[in-house]
């Protein structure tokens, strides 16, 4: 192996840093092109902020944690705070009343056929 001077190492590091900056720019461009509608205020870590880590470490369970998480998700999606989801049976009944027939959907037909077996 040839002798490498400190200047050679510095030059290589500079080139490497420039390449990394270029790759980061390209990745940012690709993400913007492939996923243009990502909300700017969307945070992955915000879901972890809502739960108290001390409670989970002490194995204390919050009975309403599922409700709280769903409410936060709906809020982040833009649903009003007074939005109340209907029971599934009501939703299905409303779909049938509006003319949607589950038996017309291939996936639904497979589910119905499995239920009848």
Image: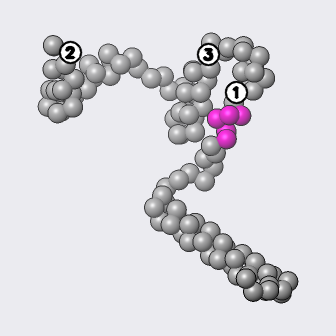
Query: Residue beneath label 1, please?
Result: 51
Give residue 42's position: percent from left, percent from top. 60, 47
Whole-angstrom CA distance, mark 1 to mark 3, is 11 Å
Are discs 2 and 1 less than 8 Å apart at CB?
no
Query: Residue beneath label 3, please?
Result: 64
Q: Is residue 28 left or right of residue 33?
A: right
Q: Residue at x 57, y 21 (%)?
A: 66
Magenta-drawn segment = 45-49
- Mark 1 lies on a secondary structure that is loop
Q: Nearer the viewer, residue 81 or 89?
A: 89
Q: Residue at x 73, y 82 (%)?
A: 1
Give residue 107's position: percent from left, percent from top. 21, 31
Query: Residue beneath label 2, please?
Result: 115
Q: Is residue 110 left or right of residue 77?
A: left
Quick one: label 1, few (<14), some, or many (20+) residues within 10 Å?
some
Give residue 49's position: percent from left, percent from top. 71, 34
Whole-angstrom CA distance, mark 2 to mark 1, is 38 Å
């Amino acid at each position: 192996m040839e002798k490498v001077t400190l200047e050679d190492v510095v030059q290589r590091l500079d080139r490497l840093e420039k390449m990394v900056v270029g790759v980061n720019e390209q990745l940012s461009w690709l993400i913007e092109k492939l996923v243009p509608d990502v909300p700017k205020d969307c945070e992955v870590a915000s879901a972890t902020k809502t739960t108290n880590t001390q409670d989970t470490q002490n194995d204390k369970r919050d009975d309403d944690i599922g409700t709280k998480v769903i409410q936060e998700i709906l809020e982040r999606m833009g649903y009003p705070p007074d939005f109340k989801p209907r029971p599934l049976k009501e939703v299905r009944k409303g779909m049938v009343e509006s003319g949607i027939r589950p038996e017309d959907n291939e996936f639904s037909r497979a589910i119905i056929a499995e239920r009848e077996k």
